[in-house]
Amino acid sequence: MTTTIELGAVEGFILDDPVAGVLDNTTYTLGGVSFVDIADSMVSASVARGKNRDLDRYASGKFNVLLNNEDRRFDPNYSAGPLFGNIIPRREIRISKDGVRVFTGIIEDWNFDYAPAGSSRAEIVAVDEFTNLARTFTTPGTATPQKSGERVAAILDSSSVDWPADRRDIDTGVSALGADTIGDGDALDYLQKVTASEQGALFISKSGDLQFRSRLDFTPTSTSVTEFADDGTGVPYSRVNVNFGTELLLNTVSIEALPGTATSQNDRSRISYGIISENISTLLDSTEQAQGLADWLVEKYADPEFRFSGIELSLDKLTSGQRASVLALELGSVIKITFTPNGIGDPVVSFGQVIRLDHEIGRTTHDMVIGVAAIEKTFLVLDDALFGTMDTTNVLAP
């Protein structure tokens, strides 16, 4: 296994700039930002991307790396160091495993500790571009009625956000949003409200692109599903995590749409488990849409279910082919888990959508936790070996 940690270390040449525009300098070059691999100094690293529950919003991804700094290579005050002038916040950083990107983000902090004996360490704390969106304000104005994905694109195109067109992948979306007065608030919060209206997904990919997915985006096929199993038929794992409680239990849901509020409740569930409610603010253009969303959420979460919430595995114990299939996973990928509790009884088989990808990386080890949200129903895929059979889980329409 090969780990690569690339630090954006050279700024681009800027014409007429008194510092970055000086000819023949070696720091600011015409080639723009270059990257330096610093993985040989890594002591340990961790990556956390995604969310803990299906009902949560996707959070900003985080990357921490602890570095050996005995030679003061990462000391911002050591002018003889090879990276002098580049040990500063807001540089881009990315980590890959076996040539596959795991995280792309921006350095927030450099932390240092120095010991008299010379065993000094440097720590990089990095986040993905969600953090920048949270610090960027929307341009006040009035949005016209449009699909959810079109609203996301409009916010990203606004002068105050100005998100690069080549660093986004936006679905059109299903939900119709109404005309809305956009205030001077943070861009991420507004985009999350659009996402709540769609009941889709908004996140920064491991390559650093902004992804917006509609609630109908994923259509799994037998060739797109990565299989994990404890019986030798799939990628092996060390532990499976299961939830059976109130983590995903709702029996009263109110959806705030632009024209008004719609509410749905399951009386049987309320009697059995008590009232567990959720209020969701949206930009939907009709109470009919809001009612449909409220009904769907109550139907989906009215009862506790035996749900797989994640699996744990060690990449260093897998074959190269198995590692490649695991590293190819992204938030939203579909996986199949086969699990026989303690080897007793029939195997339990479940399909899940990846909602969390966590990594703990050492010099010779690489452990992962893959968080999943159970998929109760999938859409019919004609002629597919897994999803081409009409039954209670493969349906023609939502």
Image (spheres, grey):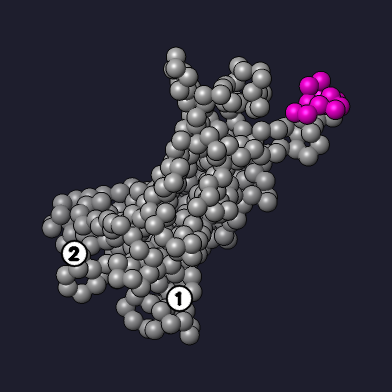
Residue 168 in the figure: left or right of residue 245? right
Q: Which amino acid does label 2 sit on?
A: Asn
SS assignment for the magenta stretch, majority:
loop
Residue stretch in magenta: 16-27
Tell me residue 79's x, y (percent).
Answer: 66, 18
Residue at which label 2 appears: 342
Tell me residue 193's x, y (percent).
Answer: 47, 47
Residue at the far top in the pictured view: 116
Q: What element carries label 2?
A: helix
Is residue 228 shown to the viewer in this render? yes
Looking at this view, is 33 or 128 the one in front? 33
Tell me residue 286's x, y (percent).
Answer: 45, 57
Please state the total of marks drawn on the protein image.
2
Q: How crowded is mark 2: few (under 14 residues within 10 Å), some or many (20 or more)?
A: few
x 86%, y 27%: residue: 23
Looking at this view, is 249 or 279 the one in front? 249
x 66%, y 20%: residue: 80
Q: Quadrant of residue 306?
A: bottom left
Report the disc number at residue 222. Answer: 1
The C terminus, quarter of image: bottom left
Look at the picture and state if 14 lies above or below 246: above
